[in-house]
Image (cartoon, helix red, strand yellow):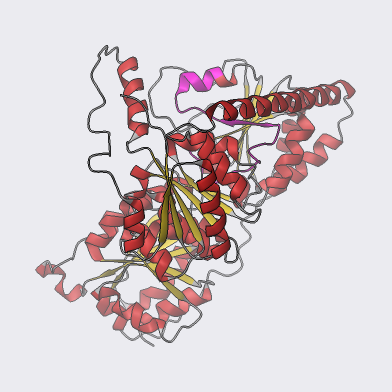
């Protein structure tokens, strides 16, 4: 059997049904073999970054390993930014790139380079087989490593001559692996004791809550405790509905502001994520000295990585929630239960008041020209069908999007991590492939969209049900906000304008760009037109783009 057949058989053995790729000459063994593997679909991207971005979101939305197929050194280089996002987002990926014939290695062939060295900094593991005999073992390890918590991308280079070599070593898998370790009973008992005695507990829910199917258990726990729930500033999933009374928003990305956020809380429980990611340096602790800090992870590598803990616990999150519920049931502290009920009632009352203020604010913003991001987000939310999935890369509009949607069932919201932009438009492809039959609505800023605008062609080529909503403020607004922060932090007093952060000269023509790639598109300036456009696009199926002109940040 040839190496390329072992490769394809390995994909099939691991349940792969989709490959996202941008092919080249060294990928001919894979492309030619696809004809004989009708159960594996190849989604063509026009840029390697789009392929990896789509595979990343596909892995998150499908709950399985995503596969991306790239082209030699330049192609892998094009994808490094998206690989970084996959690594930060804990997305299980197997990323391959064709490699030149190893017999030419010393001659420095065109497009050749050390692909393993290129990929290693942004993957969990990277390898290149020296012969076809190594293909099956390497691929077996690649899939195993990608899924091991914390999950993430791995890379395998595929030399063209190795793919054509003969081998007797056939494809196989690592077998049925039970990675879901049970938590320590003593640790769970101690955690229950700490939670029951907390005066004002808070929970920071990481992406693993959704990845491990623990959203319902989280909801039951926080309502029982009357606990405030936060998510990381950048997160890939939404573990609790945006409009749930216990959901209190995002953790800031500055230590001083994180400390201010948690100051009212005497206990903070960190669940399933890398805590915390910062943008600006502060010489300040995240928590007060008397705050009890507890962390629960599926693997020990994240425990106390950046924090000193009162208690660290390793265990599969659903198992931890089950054990914790039983441990809390055993407690008969009436005062603790009454305190939790009072906290929960206060959170419900607070959410009701916030909803009223939001509607009042929305009324004041209605009808403005250009439209406010708040009005745009609410309009889209109300026009979306109930079964729709949201992909969000609205950047500076993310707060408005956060307030407009009630999503948070674990499989209806996806976003990028790591801070690299362009993930949303590309990622929407993967979500649409992972969730056929459910329309996908993808928010993106105009600056972000231009990083992966080629994704529109792929959406049209494969007739994917995606409505791309481009919030066009014609600027890099996030950079303007960060410039304000930078100047304030370093004591720079100036009346200078924002340098090189406007996108209006010339104006980006998103309707023309979309139409040129086979996607129907329209530009809207009013809420009524936006609601009509989104409703019609969702009903029609296939890809559509709606460009919404929204207000920017004044210079």
Q: Nearer the viewer, residue 391 or 527?
A: 527
Q: Nearer the viewer, residue 12 or 490?
A: 490
Can I make out residue 148 in this image? no
Q: Is residue 262 above or below residue 100?
A: above
Dividing the picture into quarters, in which one does residue 493 lie?
A: top left
Residue 226 as seen in the image, left or right of residue 335: left
Dividing the picture into quarters, in which one does residue 106 lie?
A: bottom left
The percent position of residue 123, horizontal first and vertical second, equals: 38, 53
The percent position of residue 354, horizontal first and vertical second, equals: 66, 25
Residue 456 as seen in the image, left or right of residue 214: left
Dividing the picture into quarters, in which one does residue 499 lie?
A: top left
The percent position of residue 480, horizontal first and vertical second, equals: 33, 28
The percent position of residue 443, horizontal first and vertical second, equals: 47, 47
Report how many numbered discs are placed on residues in the image: 0
**Secondary structure mainly formed by the magenta segment:** loop
- Quadrant location, the C terminus: top left
Q: Is residue 246 magenta?
A: yes
- Quadrant location, the N terminus: bottom left
For the magenta stretch, what is the residue range?
A: 234-260
Q: Is residue 394 above or below residue 456?
A: above
């Amino acid at each position: 059997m040839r190496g390329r057949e072992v490769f394809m058989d390995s994909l099939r053995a691991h349940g792969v049904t989709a490959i996202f790729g941008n092919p080249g000459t060294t990928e001919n063994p894979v492309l030619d073999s696809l004809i004989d593997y009708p159960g594996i679909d190849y989604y063509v991207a026009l840029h390697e970054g789009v392929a990896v971005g789509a595979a990343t979101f596909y892995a998150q939305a499908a709950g399985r390993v995503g596969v991306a197929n790239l082209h030699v050194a330049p192609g892998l280089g094009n994808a490094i930014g998206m690989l970084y996002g996959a690594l930060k987002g804990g997305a299980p990926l197997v990323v391959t790139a064709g490699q030149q014939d190893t017999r030419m290695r010393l001659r420095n062939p065109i497009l050749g380079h050390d692909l393993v060295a290129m990929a290693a900094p942004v993957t969990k593991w990277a390898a290149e087989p020296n012969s076809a005999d190594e293909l099956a073992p390497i691929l077996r390890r690649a899939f195993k490593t990608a899924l091991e918590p914390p999950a993430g991308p791995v890379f395998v280079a595929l030399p063209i001559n190795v793919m054509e070599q003969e081998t007797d070593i056939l494809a196989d898998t690592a077998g049925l692996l039970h990675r879901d370790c049970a938590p320590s009973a003593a640790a769970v008992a101690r955690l229950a004791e700490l939670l029951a005695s907390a005066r004002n507990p808070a929970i920071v829910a990481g992406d693993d809550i959704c990845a491990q199917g623990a959203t319902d258990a989280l909801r039951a726990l926080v309502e029982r405790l009357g606990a405030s729930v936060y998510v990381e500033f950048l997160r890939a999933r939404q573990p609790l509905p945006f409009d749930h009374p216990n959901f209190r928003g995002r953790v800031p990305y500055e230590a001083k502001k994180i400390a201010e956020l948690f100051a009212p809380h005497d206990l903070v429980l960190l669940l399933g994520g890398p805590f915390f990611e910062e943008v600006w340096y502060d010489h300040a602790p995240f928590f007060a000295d008397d705050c009890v800090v507890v962390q629960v992870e599926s693997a020990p590598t994240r425990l106390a990585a950046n924090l000193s803990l009162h208690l660290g616990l390793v265990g599969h999150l659903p198992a931890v929630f089950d054990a914790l519920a039983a441990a809390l049931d055993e407690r008969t502290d009436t005062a603790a239960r009454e305190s939790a009920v009072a906290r929960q009632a206060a959170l419900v009352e607070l959410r009701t008041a916030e909803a009223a203020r939001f509607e009042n604010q929305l009324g004041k913003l209605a009808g403005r020209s250009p439209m406010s991001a708040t009005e745009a987000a609410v309009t889209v939310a109300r026009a979306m069908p109930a079964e729709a999935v949201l992909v969000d890369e609205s950047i500076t509009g993310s707060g408005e999007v956060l307030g407009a949607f009630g999503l948070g069932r674990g499989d209806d919201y996806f976003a990028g991590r790591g801070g690299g932009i362009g993930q949303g438009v590309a990622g929407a492809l993967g979500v649409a492939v992972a969730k056929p039959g459910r329309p996908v609505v993808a928010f993106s800023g105009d600056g972000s969209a231009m990083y992966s605008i080629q994704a529109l062609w792929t959406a049209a080529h494969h007739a994917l049900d995606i409505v791309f909503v481009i919030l066009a403020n014609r600027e890099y607004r996030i950079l303007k906000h960060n410039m304000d922060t930078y100047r304030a932090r370093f004591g720079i007093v100036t009346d200078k304008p924002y340098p090189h952060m406007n996108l209006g000269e010339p104006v980006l023509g998103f309707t023309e760009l979309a139409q040129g790639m086979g996607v129907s598109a329209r530009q809207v300036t009013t809420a009524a037109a936006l609601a009509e456009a989104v409703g019609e696009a969702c009903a029609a199926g296939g890809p559509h783009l709606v460009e919404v002109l929204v207000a920017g940040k004044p210079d």
